[in-house]
Image (cartoon, grey):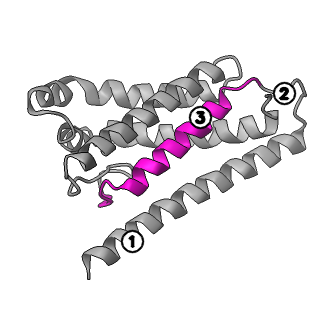
Amino acid sequence: MVLPEVVGIALAGFLAWLLATAGMHKLRHPAQFSELAAQYLPPPLRPLWRDRLVYPVGILEIAVALALLLPQTRTAAALLAATLLTGYALMMAWQLAQGRRDLRCGCAGPASDVLVSPALVLRNLLIAALALLLALPAGPFAVSASGILLALCMAGFFIGLYLAAEQLISNSQHMARSR
């Protein structure tokens, strides 16, 4: 199977936006993310996260975002993006399996009050699947200027879908809490 280059550019743009945004949130608000992420770990591992991992994970997310934009590094970056997203989904799924539904996700930044939920796990796994799709070989066709414009519009559409899904999940949680 060969992925059309226009679709690859669009997926790369979307995933780059997602990971760069996540990385920037971590680098701008390390204390909040350190505390939030530490809640996902067993108590013996929490100091390790607090003291050493917030900055490297944020930098890694930004580096993967940048690597997604380069055709030479796109496949490896897509595989790494899929690994990160799957890891985040598994961390949330583990918390849900433990009965912890009171943890904030942190996906939309430190100000977000979206809680971990099966919908977030599914969302992350779907995005990880998109990243795996991006790891497929690209078509041999050169992309014209109009193709690049189409890819940028598609990336914007994917970003809009992501933001709409995030808002729907948030609204659903707010409505469930107010009952």
Q: Earlier in the sequence, mark 1 or mark 2?
A: 2
Q: Earlier in the sequence, mark 3 or mark 2?
A: 3
Asked if residue 176 is positioned above or below residue 87 in the image, the reply reads: below
Report how far apart the C-alphas of labels 3 and 1 lie in the structure.
27 Å
Report how far apart the C-alphas of labels 1 and 2 lie in the structure.
40 Å
Q: Which mark is residue 139?
A: 2
Label 2 element class:
loop
Foreground residue among 128 and 170: 128
Asked if residue 140 is positioned above or below residue 160 in the image, the reply reads: above
Q: Is residue 122 left or right of residue 69?
A: left
Question: In the rendered structure, which segment of residues is drawn in magenta?
Answer: 111-137
The quarter of the displayed image where residue 60 is located: top left
Q: Is residue 102 left or right of residue 126?
A: left
- The type of residue carrying mark 3 is Ala
Local packing at callout 2 (Cα closer than 10 Å; few below 14, some 14-19, many 20+) is: some
User: Mark 3 highlights which residue?
Assistant: 131
Residue 11 is situated, as x and y percent measured from the top left of the image, at 66, 40
Residue 21 is situated, as x and y percent measured from the top left of the image, at 46, 43
